[in-house]
Amino acid sequence: MAFAGVLSTPPGSTTRAATSESDYLSDVPTVISVSRLTQTLDDTPGALTILDRDFIRMTGARNVVDVLRFVPGFQTTSSFETDAPIATYHGRSNDWANRIQVLVDGRSVYSGLLQGSAGIGWQTLALDDIERIEILRGSNSATYGARAFLGVVNIVSRDVRETTGTAVGLTRGENAAADAGMRVGWTVGDASFRISADSVSDDGLQGAFGKNHTERLNFSSHWDLEHGADLALRAGGVGIYAGRGSLEAGQFGNPARMRFQGSKFIQADWSAPWGESQDLSLSASHTENSERDSFTYLDHLVLPGIPVDFYGATIDFGGNETVDTLTAQHTIRFSPSLRGVWGAELRQERIDSRAQFDQLAGVSTHFFRLFGSAEWRLNDTLLLNAGALAERSNIAGDSLSPRLMLNWRVAPGHTLRAGASTAFRPPSAFEKYGQVQYYDASGQYATGYFTYNNGTLASEKLFSRELGYHLAPRESEVSADVRVFSEHISDGVGATNGTVIPGLQPSTTLNGEDYRIDGVELQGQWNLSPATQLMLAQNWTTIAINASPSGGSTWFRTEHGAPRYAASLSLMHTFAQGLHLSLMHQVVDDVALLSISNSPWLFSMQRTDVRLAQDFRIAGKKAELSFVLQNLGEPFQDGDWKFRFNRRALISLKFEN
């Protein structure tokens, strides 16, 4: 049960107007990440991939990002050099991935402190605390606004009522891998609680000062209230200690060092029925992100026109960010054939970082969003999904993003869909207002600006069209989903290459990129037997550039930011007596990597993993002993052409009662 095709409900089945925890616990789960309405997969206005808990466990992955490499159209990296490991969809042209919306239990983990990346947010939950991951492959600004430019990933945690008792786990392996985790869950009356803590460590990638250590603490709770209402409270924090900088001798301007990224949050979600056909829900969250990265500059930097030597100056890339969000939502069923949802969201972000904004010191952004979606069943075979979101922000003004999708059930288990949508992405705070210059040891004399953005940058725009085919016949062992898409990005954001010499032009971020992303994505699953599953994901992608504001300096990286072809094949089998075997192979062809944006070099990579696990019991407790061998082949480039992912052998032991 790894991919969307196996999770469809029988044709003609109905769902109630709003979402509840039971939607995740039923034998045939529905999804909420597309329109904010609970929908079966053949009714959703878009292509979804669902990675469930069993699939996540059997991959042997150690973090969420590594799981997403099995999703068509996604690119991932294990590097902690610039950001925490990241995932992106349909290309990456810089060090950050800021064109998809990432949600953890509905809370956006977008971080303006890291130029719009979700790098810290990807690490919010330990894999053992995740129930499933819903990935919408396609724009969804019509539902979630600015940051859902190319897609949405919603990470859903396990129901706290299903994790009572204790669980512990240990992992050791090559490359100094050392992981440990624990979980405790309990129930008191109508309330359930869970506390989990874990840490993940290794020596990172070959060629990088990649030592890294991630530690997490999370609290979850659920209260059953009167009259069918419920309340969920969550809080947690994650800290990432990671290596950064050059290992080469004499690199005193970028020395190998450790830096810290951290995030902590609190979240409350309340929902209640309102009569027989309506639901109300409220959600509020507060998030704080931070980065600590500084070192002493020990090179003699003397630039033309600058009479001061910067030897001994402190270089500080640190900063802090706070994010507050409040969302209200009303779901209503008007008739058996028509239902809808509407609501509003307020979001406020504040970044304080002189390193990023120089004399501005910090930037505040405010968002107000009104959203609405409707599902109209025209007849037994045709379903129309319509939605739109209007957004007002102080960083990009007013925007409107509509979506229209028609699903045609041509036969039971066979659904065609066709639709179009528009999207927008306001610039990140750094893209619009970023100002970077460095000061001498006295803190007075500056180099002149490395980066200078004057606040005139506008939003990127996207027009997306797609055709799809969802295959999930009842009683069939085969399921699949095909997406054919064309995405046109205009007013795209790109940076010019500047100079740090006073009087000459610094790097500036401009609108002006214009290009199309066309392609085909396929995902499928074949249940060869009750104990054997074969899963396939493939994508073919072409990016054609019409214009670039940077005069060609980032043209090659943009055009080849997504691989021409990528595929993954996973075979999972359960033998008698609880023995599990997983075989996974991935191939990526013709993709540009970072650090060489001006060089016409394309790379191809392959990775093969094997996992063998045995279930058993000790003193009445469930246990699992597993062995994972990651990357059976030669080391391959990971994110940056200088970094390589080596072969790693890992052994894990887990207990649960």
Image: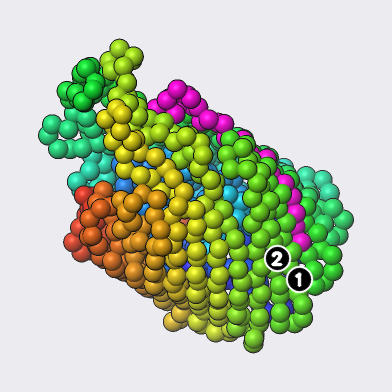
Q: Amino acid at mark 2?
A: Ala
Q: Position of residue 474 (x, y in %)?
A: 60, 83
Contact (Cβ within 8 Å) of mark 1 with mark 2? yes
Residue 533 image offset from top left, x and y in percent: 43, 75
How many residues crowd around disc 2 within 10 Å: few (fewer than 14), some, or many (20 or more)?
many
Q: Which residue is mark 2?
A: 386
- The three-letter amino acid code for the residue at tag 1 is Trp
Asked if residue 552 can be seen in this view, the reply is: yes
Residue drawn at x 51%, y 36% is 455
| Tag in front: 1 or 2 | 2
Q: Position of residue 456 (x, y in %)?
A: 51, 39
Q: Nearer the viewer, residue 325 or 362?
A: 362
Q: Disc 2 on helix, strand or loop?
A: strand
Segment colored magenta? 340-364
In the current view of this chain or complex, which residue is farthest to the top?
442
* The furthest residue to the left: 249
Q: Name the residue nearer the viewer: 413 or 352.
A: 352
Residue 362 magenta-highlighted: yes
Is 449 above or below relative to 515? Answer: above
Question: In this rendering, does residue 169 appear at all?
Answer: no
Q: Nearer the viewer, residue 218 or 623?
A: 218
